[in-house]
Amino acid sequence: MPSIRKLPEVLINQIAAGEVVERPASVLKELLENSLDADSRAIEVQLTQGGIKQLRVTDDGCGIAKEDLALALERHATSKIATLEDLEAVGTMGFRGEALAAISSVARTRITSRARGTSHAWRVSEREHEPMPAALNGGTVVEVDDLYYNTPARRKFLKSDATEYGHCDDAFRRVALARPEVGFQLSHNGRVNLRLAPGDAERRAREILGDDFMAQARMIDVASGALRLFGFASLPAYARSNRDAQYFYVNGRFVRDKIIQHALRQAYADILHGDRHAAYALFLELDPAGVDVNVHPAKTEVRFREGRAIHQFVFHALTRALAAPVQAAIHVPESNDYIAPASPTEQAHLGVAEPVQARYFSPTQFAPAGGRTPSFEALGAFAPRNQAPNGAMPNALPATTQGAPLGYAIAQLHGIFVLAQNESGLVLVDMHAAHERILYEQLKHVLDGTPGVQRLLIPAVFNASKIEMATAEDHADTLQQMGFDVAPAGPNELAVRSVPALLARASVMDLLRALLGELRDFPATEVIAARRNELLGTMACHGAVRANRQLTLPEMNALLRDMEATERADQCNHGRPTWVQLSMNELDKLFMRGQ
Ligand SMILES: Nc1ncnc2c1ncn2[C@@H]1O[C@H](COP(=O)(O)OP(=O)(O)OP(=O)(O)O)[C@@H](O)[C@H]1O
Ligand SMILES: [Mg+2]
């Protein structure tokens, strides 16, 4: 029988390193977090050969006192917490007192540091724990050489220098994005690759995520009690084919959390289709006591005490920012923001009594052009009711109470676009895409309640394949729930006697064929719940006005008013924009007026 014995300290640390030090990027993350915890204002990272040969982090933080230097390399030694209460309210990135011990057990490690207010620096290494005098102006330099030099089995798992550098670059960006007030520099093999001056959150987000992202992003800043969500989230037009640009932080810590990811996916579910992924840099702040960060050694997982409430809060904050109707987005007051108090239902969802304030804006898309700063009130005044073609505007709200942000129709172009004039200039609407979106949103309500049904004067009868016949029979309930009355009219014929009222104009045969195609492979019970959005999308697409249908001015104006009243009307179901604004300024520029 093998005897039980205590493991040597070095082996204990190497085992711990297995969890914390996966690759150079994880070393870099730990060193950067230590520099931030030391209140640094400037942090420089120098990597050699993907960080495998050397990682060097220099900061201007508080430094480490001579008598603490050796302890910094020891396991379970930290300056950041002392009691369980400290742990439960931890505000620093580190708290385990483990990272440097783990790193120095698998790589040659040197720490040179000069504590603030002392006359010179001291140095320790993984082999020499007794501090030796060293030269340094201030702050701390940590050098980590030859990662896994003593654990070749782990070394084998490292990838090429380029791949490891890529991971380091990711880790660097994640940290830098959350701390815009700190300056960062990253170089590789002697070349500076990224230099980030201290600045504000918007500037840092632009540097890390790029101009294209910012041009298609909405700023979010929503607070409710002790919860706050702020940052930037892309509109669907900027959707990407991978998840690379998804940054979410909890109290400044980059995390991947199931609850959060679910909330974000849901918020985007309606406007992002298929295999497209959103991009965002979002920061959730809450009382540290409400979140446990001591879940995993790498600290990328957290546990929320009130998971459900957090889910609701994040979901609603983001949904609202993305859905901010046309009115909210188009008028950008001088301060570049729009204050929209939460509706009572939203407040109920958030579980708060006090008003919630949200600020949304789409930084470039709707920015006031040149000197023109359209105001909400001015728009109402611009189109007095008696000038508006208000003959048949079933959905138009009285002009006195409500402006017409999308203006009034002036023409239809090639059977595809509606042209309208508003206070800022010209509005171009993709009429099919816009109408599709409106129908989609309206149909949602239909599915939630009893659908308005349009009985057909003459039943529409059409030839159906065997599989279509069978599908119609299997899913008769689902179809009825959606407002369709479909029944066999012969061995190879289906008869449709009613359709949802909202789709009265659609080609019944095309619509039903498409729906049957969607329903075909699904067990009847799952359909509505599982494929709701796809079914709605199919229905909306078939119900929406087709290209080349001539619309009258009143019909076009009704469409504009519907858009204004519809959430998420800015994008079609597939995430493309439904309308664009060409300001007078932009038009002037086309003709070089005033130049
Ligand atoms: N760049 C630095 N500047 C100042 N002090 C530092 C720096 N790096 C490390 N230290 C000190 O060394 C201690 C040990 O660092 P280490 O990263 O091992 O543990 P930690 O940060 O406390 O916890 P964790 O293991 O969760 O990172 C820290 O508590 C801190 O006091
Ligand atoms: Mg640390």
Image (cartoon, rainbow, N blue to C red):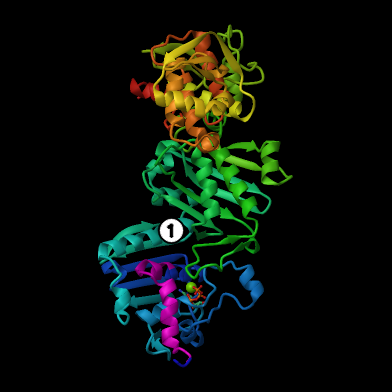
Q: Is 28 one of the magenta-colored residues? A: yes
Q: Position of residue 512 (x, y in %)?
A: 46, 21
Is residue 590 inside the magenta stretch? no
Q: Is residue 413 left or right of residue 309?
A: left
Residue 91 visible within the image = yes
Give above or below for 93 relative to 452.
below
Nearest to the observer: residue 516 or residue 136: 516
- Say which quarter of the image contains residue 174: bottom left
Residue at image location 58% in from the left, 49% down from the top: 229
| Magenta region, main secondary structure | helix
Give the x, y percent position of residue 552.
48, 7
Residue, disc 1: 174
Task: Identify the residue at image location x=52%, y=48%.
Answer: 231
In which quadrant of the rendered image does the C terminus lie? top left
Given residues 51 and 559, the one toward you in this image is 559
Q: Amino acid at mark 1?
A: Arg
What x and y, as percent, mark residue 180?
A: 47, 56
In this picture, residue 251 sits left or right of residue 153: right
- How packed mark 1 is, by other alpha carbons closer than 10 Å (few <14, some 14-19, many 20 or more), is many
Residue at image location 42% in from the left, 44% down from the top: 277
- SS class, disc 1: helix
Q: Is residue 166 above or below residue 588?
A: below
Q: How many marks?
A: 1
**In this rendering, position of residue 199 left or right of residue 306:** left
Residue drawn at 44 percent across, 72 percent down? 19
Observer-nearest of 542 and 268:
542
Residue 165 vs 261, above or below: the answer is below
Question: Residues in magenta?
Answer: 5-29
Q: Position of residue 275 (x, y in %)?
A: 39, 42
